[in-house]
Image: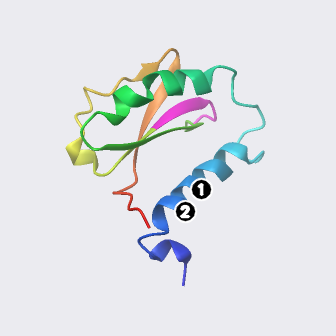
Amino acid sequence: MCPCANRFARPLCLILLLTITVACPAAEDTPMPPGIQEIKHKYESHLLAMDGVVSVGIGRDAQGGAAIIVGVEDAARVDPAALPQALEGFPVILQVIGSPRAQ
């Protein structure tokens, strides 16, 4: 049985998947641009304060460019107009991940 089937392991699996996607050379050969960590950190508390937002991370958009990934429990709980389309030049991507639970 997949460890992701365990409701407690799901958040860990999602973090691992995001880490692998970002770190994997097959996903994109170019490194993350300098400063994206600082931009994520700068806006993280504001984004996490929004209804339904449960995580903020860094990843890649469909074209392989660096992006800020906003994880939400349920897309229906988030007002798309309230989310920025970009933060200081980096696109913001909405990703439905469900509700994380502590072990």
Contact, mark 1 vs mark 2 (Cβ under 8 Å): yes
- Which corner quadrant holds the N terminus? bottom right
Disc 2 packing (10 Å; few <14; some 14–19; many ≥20) = some
x 35%, y 26%: residue: 46
- In front: 94, or 58? 58
Q: Which amino acid does label 2 sit on?
A: Cys
Q: Quadrant of residue 25?
A: top right
* 85 drawn magenta: no
How are the residues colored?
Answer: rainbow
Give amino acid for label 1: Leu
Q: Is mark 1 on a helix, strand or loop?
A: helix
In the image, taking residue 10 as reference, residue 72 lies left or right, namely left
* Alpha carbons under labels 1 and 2: distance apart: 6 Å
Judge whether residue 27 can be spotted in this image. Answer: no
Q: State which quadrant residue 77 falls in.
A: top left
Q: Where is residue 100 in the image (x, y as percent from the top left)?
A: 39, 58
Residue under label 1, please give it. Answer: 17
Q: What element carries label 2?
A: helix
* Mark 2 lies on residue: 13
What is the magenta range?
62-69
Reply yes or no: does residue 65 show up in magenta: yes
Tag count: 2
Residue 50 shows in this picture: yes
Percent x, y for residue 42? 48, 21
Quadrant showing the C terminus? bottom left
In this picture, residue 51 sits left or right of residue 86: left
Question: Image point 50% across, 71% down: which residue?
Answer: 4
Residue at x 43% of width, y 24% of height: 43
